[in-house]
Amino acid sequence: MSIITDWTAEKATAFGQENLGFQHNLHERPMFDDEGLARLLDLYPRDKLGVFTMGEDPKAWTTWRKGAAGTLSGDQLLEAAKAGRIWLNLRQTNDHVPEYAALCDEIFAEKEARVPGLRTFKRDLGMLISSANAQVFYHLDVPLVSLWQVRGQKKVWVYPVADPYVGELALEKIVLRETAEQFAFDPAWDSGAAVYDLTPGRMVTWRQNAPHRIENGPMLNVSISIEFMTPAALLRANVIYANGVLRRRLGARPRVQDGFGPTAVAKLAVARGAKALGLQTPHVRHLPVTFGLDAARPGMLVEA
């Protein structure tokens, strides 16, 4: 039985190239009920669990703060997500929990069977457990992304990969890891966005590097976030990386090439060479831990 229930030839051809919405049946699986989520939170490595809170203004991306879960049990963490304003990010769940490794394999086996010529790697199936009305600020990702809604409701705005939403200089800085993936947002840009209302059983995937932001509805949200690469996506990331190196080292004014043309392939060699020589030193933004979670009062933050 297929996980995605509305594959069409048109969607299969456009997959990875366009913004697309799908229907799925993962929300029907018991692994995502309260008991299953609490067990997942107990099994997932605590030192890798991302715990975040944030402000309410979608422009105030610097209010995104990192916290620590401490020794709270899975049940307590789930209660904190239900009662508070936090975002639990379980990156690469497929690398740490066998049940989710099997789910990841199942999803990608179906995608590769349905999409002609699709080959995927660098697969990251992450779980997102987040509070009512929580949000993720305007940002973009280097890999391809799909977002699967399992519980609750959220709204996703996906913006074009173009000025003014994201310029080539801003894109280079993110790929070179000079800046964070989050950056300044103008609410006027919403008029140019594709908007998706996600409810259980809906999934959306978008163009590589498309900026997006997310707002939860007034209830607990559970979603699966999947990042992955294809040969074309990896080549694009390396072209952008090479453009950044050429601009900084030679004062060039390069442009992004899509596809496997000779210029793009030459830039792949530039990117690999620059990485091997260490020409670009990434300035990774490490957020300090500024709060903990109160075991006695679910949803309450304890300032560090």
Image (spheres, rainbow, N blue to C red):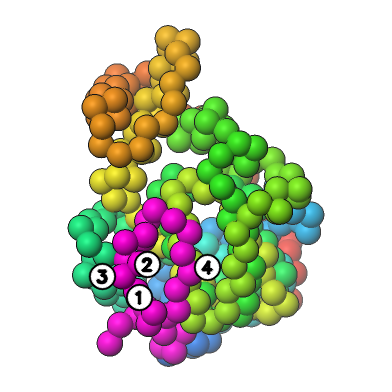
Residue 13 image point, x, y percent: 31, 61
Q: Between disc 2 and disc 3, whose residue precedes?
A: 2
Q: Between disc 4 and disc 2, whose residue precedes?
A: 2
Q: Between disc 3 and disc 4, whose residue precedes?
A: 3
Q: Would residue 284 be found to the left or right of residue 62 on screen? A: left
> Are the two marked residues, 1 and 2, in contact with CB atoms closer than 8 angstroms?
yes
**Residue highlighted by disc 2:** 11
Q: Point out the residue furthest to the top here.
A: 250
**Residue highlighted by disc 3:** 114
Q: From what the image shows, is residue 286 above or below residue 54? A: above
**Kind of residue at disc 4:** Leu
Residue 75 falls in image quadrant: bottom right
**Kind of residue at disc 2:** Lys
**Kind of residue at disc 3:** Arg
Residue 20 image point, x, y percent: 46, 64
Residue 263 image point, x, y percent: 29, 25
- Nearer to us of marks 1 and 4 is 1
**Residue highlighted by disc 1:** 7
Q: Nearer the viewer, residue 285 or 167?
A: 167
- Distance from disc 3 to disc 1, alpha carbons, whole Å, reads 8 Å
Residue range corresponding to the magenta coloring: 1-29
Dot 2 falls on a residue whose secondary structure is helix
